[in-house]
Image: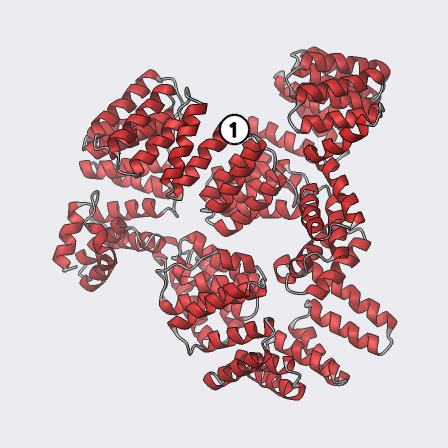
Amino acid sequence: MAVLLPFQAFAADPDKAARFYEDALARYQRNDYTGTVIQLKNALQQNRKMLAAHVLLGRALLAVGDAVGAETSFNTAIELGVDRAEVELPLVQAIYAQGRFAEVIARGIPAALPASVRQDLLIVRGSAEGELNDHRAAKKSFDEARAIDPRAPTLIMAEASQALRVGDLPRALSLSQQAITLAPQRAEAWAARGAALAANRQQTAALDAFGRALTLDAMMVDARLARIDILIELDRDAEAAKDLEVLRTQAPADPRAAYRRGVLAARKNDVAGVAREMAEVVKAIDVIPPEIRARRANLLLIGGMAHYSLNNTEKARANLESFLRLQPYHPGATRMLAAAYLSSRDVARATTLLEDYLRRVPADAQARTLLGSAYLVQKRYAKASALLERAVSQGSADAGMRATFGASLAGQGLDAQAALQLRSAFETNPADQAIGASLAVLLLQRGEAAQAVAVLDRLFAANPRSPIVLNLLGLARARAGDRAGARKAYEAAIAVDPRFDPARLNLARLDIADGNADAARARLQQMLREQPANADALVDLALLDRRAGKVESAQKGLEKAMAVAPRHPRAPLILIEDALAAGDSATAVRIARTAAAAMPSDLPILLALARSQLAAGDTARAKESLGEARKRLEGDPAALVQIARMQIAAAHLQGAAISVSKALEAQSDFLPALELQAEISLRNNDLALAERQGRAIVERYPGRAAGYQVLGDVALSRGQMAAGLAHHRTAYERERTADNALRAYRAFLAAGEPARGLALLQEYQQANKSSNDLQVPIAIAEAQIRSGDLKAAKATLEALIKRSPQTGLLNNYALVLLQLGDPGALGAAERAWRAAPNDPQVIDTYGWVLAKTGQLDRGLGYLRDARLRSPRDAEIRFHLAWVLAKVGRIKEARDELSPVRSELAKPGMPEEARKLAAELGV
C-alpha cells in the first residue's frame, strides 16, 4: 500500500514514521495484527496525518474484531482526505459488524468503483437486507453480485447465510458445500457449513465443521459459541465449559458467553451462579454499543427488563429499542419501552411507538392509556384537545380542567383562545400558581409583557413568599423594560430563599446587562463556591470570561460544565458552535456525540450533532440524527424547514420532502416550506411540478420574490435563458436583498451576459454600502477575475481581506497575484494553507504557486496531497501533471491527465492544460 501523504510536509520524524509503517505492513501481510496495530500507532505518533497508516490501522483493527476502532480509523482517513474508493468496503464491513444494517443499505454503491469492490459491497448490502428481513431486496443484491463473478466464495457464503434466514435449509446445505469446495482453507467457509448442518439437525457433522473453522482461525467467536450451543444441547457440558473458558480470555465482555455460563449454572441448580452470570449479562450488555446489540434478541429483552426493573431507564430503552427492531409489536416490550420513554420525557418517541403499535393491536387497553398520557405530556394538542373538550362539554367547570384545555389550545397556535381559557381559570382561582404561571408565560410568549406583569402582581399578592412567582415577576418586568423592578423582584426571591438559583442567575445576568461585570462575577463565583458543579453558573462565568478576553479560562469553564453536568445542554452547544466556527468538525462531532449520548432526546443537541456530522462529511449519520429530530419537531413548521435544509445538505432529498410535507401539514401557507418544496422538485428534476409550485407561490404571495425565483430556476433548467433571467430580475425588483442580487447575477451568467450581471452587483453594493454582507463583494471579485480585470479584482480582494481574512479570499488573492506576477503570491498562498491545511483547493493553490515560483519538489508534495483529497478535480490533476512533466516523470504525468481527458476540453480550463495534454499525447 502506498504512502498517501508527503512525509516532508507533515511528519515530526518522516524517516521514523516511514520505518514504522513499512514494518507494520510486513506484519499485516504475515497476519500479525497485534504487531501491526502497535507499529501503526508508533507511526502515527510521528505523523498524525499519515493517511496510509490510518487506512492500514483500520484494516488491522477490523481483522481482530474491533469494528468500532476500525470505523474510527477509516473515518479519520476520510476526514484527512483519502479517496473513498480506498476505504469504502472495509468501512462498510465495520458498520455491518456493528449491526447498523440500515446504514449499510443507505450508503449506496458508487458505479466508479472497481468491479470486485462493487461485488463485495453488493454482498454486504445483501446480507444487511437479509438481516432486516427484506429478502426480496437481498436476492436482488446477490443477483447483481453474481453477474460480476458467480464463483466468488464470499458470495456463496453470504447466500448460504441468507438461505438459513428464510428457512431454505437444503439450499443452505448445498451452498455451504460449494463454499468448502471453492475455498477449503477459509475458516468462514467451514463456519458457514457448520451453521447449515446445525440448522439441518446434523449436530455431529456441525461440530466437526465448527472445529475445522476454529482450527483455521481460533479467534472466530461466533463459531465457538455455535459449537457451545450444540455441546449443551447434546449434554456435553464439560466440553462446553472448556470452550466457555476460552471465551473468558478471547471475549471477556461478550454477554452471549455469560448467558451460556448462566445456562450451565442453571443445569447444576446453582442459584447463586445463575444470579452472578445474569448480572454479568447486564454488565456486558451495558458496554456493547446499541448497533451491535441489535442482533441479540434474547439478551436484549432480558437486559431491557432487568434495567427497567432497576429504574435504569436509559439502558432499558436502548435494549428494548433494539429488541423491537427484531420482534416488532411484542406487547410487553412495547408497553415497557413506551413507559420508559415517558419517564425520561421522550414523549415523541412514546407517541410514535404507541400509535404504530395500536394500529396493529387496537384492543390493548394499557397501551391506549399510555398513549393518552403521551399526548398530554408531549403537548401534541390536537388529539389531547378533543379528549379535554369532550370533558368540558359534559359540564366540568373545574379550574384545573379549564387550564389544561387552554394549554392544549395554545399548543395548536390558538393563543388568543387559550389565553381566554387560562384567564377564566385564573379568575376562578387567582392564587393557583400553576394556572397563573401558565397564563403569564403564555402572555410573555405573545409579547404581552405588561399583561403578564399584571397577572403576576396578583399572583404575588396571593403568594408573597413564593420564589418561583417572584422570579417570574422579575422576568416579566425585565421584558416590560422595568429593570429596576426586575432587580427588586429577583432580590425579593433571594431574600425568601437565599439558595434559589434561578433568581441568583437572573440577577447576575441583569448585572451584566447593566454593565456591572464585577458584580455579576462575584455572584457567580459565590454560587460556585457553594455549588462547584452548578452548570449554569459555570457557563455564565465562562461567557463573562470570554467577554473579558479570557479565552482559555472560558474554554476550561465550558469543558468543566460539560464534565460535571453531562445532561446540561448549554455548555456542549457553545463548544460545538465554537469548534464548527474554527473549522474543527472532528471536535464538534466528538462533543456532540458525547452530549447526544447523555441527552438522546434533546433537540438542539440532535441538530448540533447533525450539523457537525455534515461538516465532517458523515452524511449517513447526519441523516439518522435529522430523522430523529424530525420526529420530535412535528407541528413546528419553521424547525421542520430547518431540518429539511440540513437533509438536503446531507443529500437526503426523500427525508427533506417528508419534513417539508410535515411543515405544510402544520401550516399550509408557510412560505419557506412552499419555497423549499419547489426547490426539492427542482433537485429531483421534476420541472413541471416545480413550475406549478412556483406559480402557486406567485399567486399566493405576488409581492414576494420566492415564486419568481422558482420560475426563474425552472426556466434556466430548461435552457430558456431569457425567461429565467426575466424572472430573476423580477424577484430582485420585488425584494432587493443580497441573495436575490446574487441569484440575478447567476442568471445573467447563464444567459451569457456577465457584464450586465457585474453591473447589477455593483449597483446593489453601491446602494448598500453600510451592509456587513460579504457575499456580494466576493461575487464582484469573482466577476472581475472572470472578465480578466485582475487589477480591479486585486483591489476588491484586498478590501475584503481587511474586513474578513477568509481562507477562500486569501486563496483567490494568491491566484490573482500569481497571474499578475506579483511576488506576494507565495505569502498569500501560504497564509491560506496555514488557515486551511486540509482543503484540497487551498493545498493545490499553495503547491501550484510553489511550483510556478521554481520550488518544484516542494510544490510536488502539496499537489500530490491535493490530488489524493480530490482525485476528480481536473485542474488539480493538471497542476500535478505539469510538475511531473517538468521533473521528467512523463509516464506519471500522462497517467494523471488521462482520467480527466474529457474535462480538459471544457470551458474554464486553462489553455495551458490542453497544451500539456497534447504534448503528452493524452
Q: Which quadrant: the C terminus?
A: bottom left
**Within the image, what quadrant is residue 561 found in?**
top right
- Check the image and report above or below for 816 versus 774: below
Name the spot of residue 674 as percent of width and height, x first: 47, 32
Name the spot of residue 475 as percent of width and height, x first: 70, 19
Q: Which of the two residues, 342 or 472, is positioned nearer the viewer here? A: 342
Name the spot of residue 719 as percent of width and height, x first: 26, 38
Q: Kindly identify which residue carries mark 1.
A: 670
> What kind of residue is marked 1?
Phe
- Check the image and report above or below for 275 versus 342: below
Name the spot of residue 363 as percent of width and height, x first: 77, 50
Q: Residue at x 64, y 38 (%)?
A: 569
Q: Which of the two residues, 371 or 522, is positioned nearer the viewer here? A: 371
Q: Is residue 299 left or right of residue 648?
A: right
How many marks can you see? 1
Q: Which quadrant: the N terminus?
A: bottom left
Q: Secondary structure at mark 1?
A: loop
Q: Is residue 408 left or right of residue 181?
A: right
Q: Residue at x 34, y 57 (%)?
A: 6
Q: Is residue 499 left or right of residue 99?
A: right
Q: Which of the two residues, 245 or 354, is positioned nearer the viewer here? A: 354
Q: Residue at x 45, y 24 (%)?
A: 700
Q: Which of the two residues, 516 or 702, is positioned nearer the viewer here? A: 702
**Within the image, what quadrant is residue 173 found in?**
bottom right
